[in-house]
Amino acid sequence: MRIATFNINGIKARLPRLIEWLEETRPTVACLQEIKTMDEGFPADAFEKIGYKAIWHGQKSFNGVAILADGVEPIETQRGLPGDDADEQSRYLEADVNGVRVASIYLPNGNPQPGPKFDYKLDWMERLRTYAKTLWDAEIPTALVGDYNVVPEDKDIWSPRALADDALMQPQSRDAYARMLGDGWTDAIDTFNPRGGVWTFWDYQAGAWQRDHGFRIDHLLLSPELADRMQAAGVDKEYRGREKSSDHTPVWVELAD
């Protein structure tokens, strides 16, 4: 079973690239972020044509998450992250697929910091941790995957100084992510690449892709039930270099059946 995550940065603009990736790599589950479309604009038919069933949680022009499953219907279990009834941003969607609970997560960016956007980011991360504990306590095999907008350690960026003042690199952001790991969630990519040097995002500006000036912010966190099944994890880096690509690239983990 292959679970993948891909911040697509606008599903309508990237649809050809997305279909291409799905057909070429055929993940069992594909979690998408930043679909940037209202629910009625989601191109479900395009995925049906290649054998994928989908659920989605859209928002006009911003945010938005989706879960695609190969040949089976994702059974929705949670829409929106609990803990703040006033939060209307579409950043969390969860479903059961083939006996595994999978969440597609688009964590707030938090810039500029300090300020209300950074406060929202930290509050969201604490809500995620609190909710994740309920899944943990229920012993549900769970994968919390997506764009976390956190560079966990200096080894996860081409130059720590380049983003020293960014919300993605602040001690509070990193500490919140580290607390998730401290609770027992396994970072799949880090497990297979303990020395770092693996990027999932390259900015469109300043020739970042051409110079390999990237960093790792797309993560796959696994509960113990799934961590025990891990066989491989990686980044589909080449898709960042294709025409009209997202500024992120797909990230995946392979689980034994």
Image: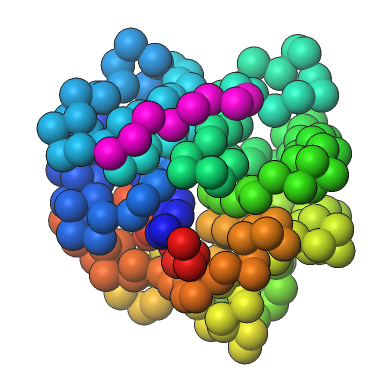
Residue 180: image x %, image y %?
Answer: 80, 56
Q: Nearer the viewer, residue 243 or 72?
A: 72
Residue at 68%, 59% in the rendered image: 225
The picture quadrant where one finds residue 36 is top left
Above or below — where is 241 with respect to 158? above
Range of residues picked out in magenta: 71-78
Q: Quadrant of residue 187?
A: bottom right
State the image quarter where residue 248 is shown: bottom left
Does residue 76 show up magenta in the picture? Answer: yes
**Height in image: 179 above or below 15?**
below
Tell me, yes or no, if residue 184 can be seen here: yes
Quarter of the image that includes the N terminus: bottom left
- Where is residue 67? Give x, y as percent: 43, 36
**Can residue 112 be seen?**
no
Viewer-closest of 190 and 153? 190
Image side of residue 89 versus residue 120, left or right: left
Farthest residue, direction bottom: 195
